[in-house]
Amino acid sequence: PRKNGGRHHVMPLHADIQVRSRRLGLDCLTPVLWSKIANGVTEAKGNGAGFYGKPYQPGAIIKNDIEYILFLRKGGQYRSPSTLQRALSMLTKNEMQSWMRSFWSDIKGESTRRGHPAPFPSELAERLIKLFSFAGDTVLDPFSGTGSTAIAALNAGRNSISNEIEPTYHRLAEQRLGEAAWMPRSAGAVNAAVIVQ
């Protein structure tokens, strides 16, 4: 804390990841800035006013409502999905116009009430999955938390592989996926099976 001689600073993880990715030979593409519209009153502990620092005085800390969504691509040839995959993966004109922008402010941040300290809405994952994969593809989530990405993949007609080492989050993800597997699909996947190992 500042009152004990400490300082507030922000770690620019997005920039570090991009630099390291370039060193590994990955291509960095235009990122998306997601304005998650978080709840400052619940995040700023202590003053209850929704900001960090002394109330109504200069020198406060600007709350970070932005998440960087980084796009990294490995080299090699572009893939050629089948005609059926292309047909099942078509986006609408409205989706293309609103999603192919570098700033997203239409998806709210997820509540921490489901038991995870850093959740994100499955709507965000579903949008990204639809933008960058085709029906029938497999999506990998190495840190699955409560299963938002797997649910989004299921809704988008994609397969998914999720890894989670925390037993509490694993159980929540299993429960959520079990419920989601019974929901009707609009396109893509017609059957859903949840296999937990």
Image (cartoon, grey):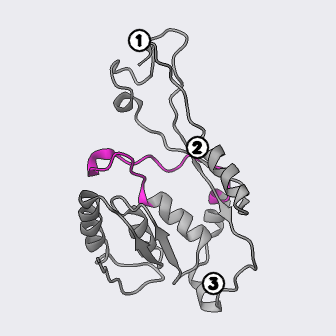
The type of residue carrying mark 2 is Leu
The type of residue carrying mark 1 is Lys
Residue placed furthest toward the front: 23
The type of residue carrying mark 3 is Arg
Residue on which disc 1 sits = 3
Residue 145 - label: none
SS for dot 2: helix
> Between tags 2 and 3, which lies in front?
2
The quadrant the C terminus occupies is bottom left
The first of marks 1 and 3 along the sequence is 1
Mark 2 → mark 1, Cα distance in angstroms: 26 Å
Which quadrant of the structure image shows residue 112? top left
Residue 13 - label: 2
**How many neighbours does mark 1 have within 10 angstroms: few (below 14), some (14-19), or many (20 or more)?**
few
Q: Which residues are magenta?
A: 98-122
Please state if 138 lies on the left or on the right of 4 as rendered: right
Mark 2 → mark 3, Cα distance in angstroms: 35 Å
x and y percent of residue 149 in the render? 43, 65
Please state if 86 lies on the left or on the right of 48 as rendered: right
